[in-house]
Amino acid sequence: MKGLLVKDMRLTLQRKQTLLIFLVVSVALGFSFDGSFIVTYVSMLMMITAMGTISYDEFDNGYPFLFSLPIDCKTYVTEKYAFCFGMELAGTVVGLIIMFITSFLTGKPVEMDGMISGVIGSFLGMSMVCAVLVYFQLKFGIEKSRMVIFGGYGVIAVILLMFKNYFNSHSISEATGLVRAVIDLAVRNPALLLVIITAVLLAIIYVMYVLTVRMMEKKEF
Amino acid sequence: MITIENLVKRYRDFELNVSLEIPDGQVCGLVGKNGAGKSTTIKSILGLIKPDSGKVVVMGKNTADMKASDKQNIGVALAESGFSGYLTVNDVIAILKNMYDDFDEEYFRHLCIRFDVPLGKVIREFSTGMKAKVRVLSAISHRAKLLIMDEPTSGLDVEARNDILDILREYLKENEDCSILISSHISSDLENLCDDIYLIHEGKIILHEDTDRILSSYAILKVDEETYGKMDRSYVLKEKKENYGYRCLTDQKQFYMENYPEIVVENGSIDDLILMLTGR
C-alpha cells in the first residue's frame, strides 16, 4: 500500500500550481466568510483533488499495468479511501489554520462550540460522499460516473425539495414519525443525536468500502 | 513456471481456447497476428481477466489464489499500459522502491543513464521507444523470476528495438533461472531470444516448436507446377498457389534438399510460419 500512497502523493504534487491557487483562493475566502465555512471548503477541495488520482490511474488504460504490480483489489481500494480521507483531513487542518489566522487578523472571535461540531459533522458528511463517489468512479469510469453523479445530485435535490415543501406546509410542532423523533432527540439530548448520526455515517462509509472492494474484485482489466 | 490447461475465455466475437507450458528457465515466445489472442492469454496469466473455464497456474499457484506477495516475483511490461504519463522516472523509482522488496534502485538508475532515459521529465513527453524502455526497465529491476512481456518492441524503430532486446538478453545472462514469456508480432525479434515458440491464431495454439528447429528444419519450397505434381508432399505442412507454381512450408528441409535438388529451398523463419499457417 505504501507504493500506491507514494504514487498518489506524487501524482497530486504534479498539480502544485493548482494546489497553490486553491490555497490563495482559500485565504481570500477566509477573510470574506465567518465561521467554519473555510474549513469545509478547503477539505472539500483536497478531497476532490485526491479523488482525481482515480482519473490518473484510469487514464491511458493504466489499470492493467497497475494491477500487475504486487497489489490486490482490496489494497487498492483501501489505499484510495485512506488517501482521500487523509487529504480531506489535511484540508481540514489547513482550513482551521486559515480560519484562526484570518480570525486573529480581522479581530472576529471564533465560536468554538458550534465550530467543533460543525467541522466534525462536515468531515464525516464529506467522507461519506467521498466513499460513494469513489465507488461510482471505480465502477463506471471517469465519463460515465459523471452522469451517475449528476443523476445522484438530481435525486438529492428532489428529496430536499420534498422536505422543503413539507416544512412549508407544516410547522415543526406538527411533525410526526421519524422527523418528530429526530427533532425531540435534538432538543432532549443533542450529544446522543450526534453519536447516532456519526455511527450512521461511519456505517455507510464501511458498507461503501465493502461494496467497492467486491465490485473491484469482480472487475476485469 | 506457467501452466495453462484448456483455458477458455469467451467474448462476443472472439473465443480464446489455449493450453501451454513454460518450464523454469525457459524463454518462450507467443507469436501471432494482431487480435489472435496474445494479450488475452497474457492477461489471463496475470489474473487481470477471469477465465470461463480451464486452469492457469503461475509459479505453483492458481491465478485466482495469487496474492499480492506472489507478484513480487513477476515483472510485467504491457504494450498499451504503464505508469501514468504524468509521473517522472524519479517518481517511478520512488513507487517501485516502496512496491517491491528487492527493487534495485542503483541498477535501475544505471540502466536509465545507459539508455538515455531522462529521470526528471514526465513520461507523457517521452518518445514511444523511451516509454517502452521505462516499461521494460520497471519489469526487470526487482530481480523477478518470471518476466511477462506483451509486445515490448511494438511500434519501435530498429535502434530502440535492439536496445530493448539487449536489455532482455543481459538480464537472461545474469539471471539464468529466470523464465520469460514474450509476445510479439515482430517475430524476428524472438528468433535470437526464445527457446521455443507458440503460434496462436484466432484464439487457438496452432503450433508449438523449438526455435532452433524452426530455423534449421523448416523451410519454404518454391516449386513449379510440374515438380509439385510429382514430388512427395508428405512433409508439406501448407501450400499456397503462386504465379510460378506453389509455395510450400515444410518442417523437413533436408529431405527436399537431398531428394529434389531442382527445388528452390529458402530457410524458414518465424515470419514464414505466421504467413503460411495463418495467412489467407
Image: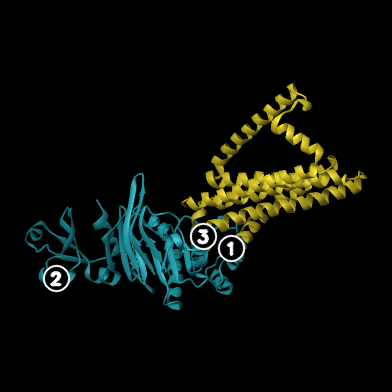
Chain colours: A yellow, B cyan
Closer to the camera in the image, A181 or B202? A181
The kind of residue tagged 3 is Lys
The kind of residue tagged 2 is Phe
Closer to the camera in the image, B81 or A179? A179
Mark 3: secondary structure = helix
Nearer to us of marks 1 and 2 is 1
Res. A63 visible in picture: yes
Q: Which residue is mark 1?
A: B92
Question: At 36% across and 44% down in the image, what residue appears?
Answer: B12
Q: Which residue is mark 3?
A: B131
Q: Determine whether label 3 and label 2 are within 8 Å by CB.
A: no
Give coordinates of residue B43: x percent, y percent.
42, 57
* Left or right of residue B151, residue B85 in this image: right
* Left or right of residue A197, residue B32 in this image: left
Q: Determine whether label 1 and label 3 are within 8 Å by CB.
A: no
Q: Which mark sits nearer the N-terminus, 3 or 2?
A: 3
Residue B44 quadrant? bottom left
Near mark 3 (Cα within 10 A), the count class, few <14, some 14-19 or many ≥20, is: some
Q: CA distance from mark 1 to mark 3?
A: 12 Å
Mark 2: secondary structure = helix
Q: Which residue is mark 2?
A: B255
Subunit ID for the residue under disc 2: B
The kind of residue tagged 1 is Val
Question: At 31% across and 63% down in the image, what residue appears?
Answer: B198
Pointer 1 and pointer 2 on the same chain: yes
Subunit ID for the residue under disc 1: B
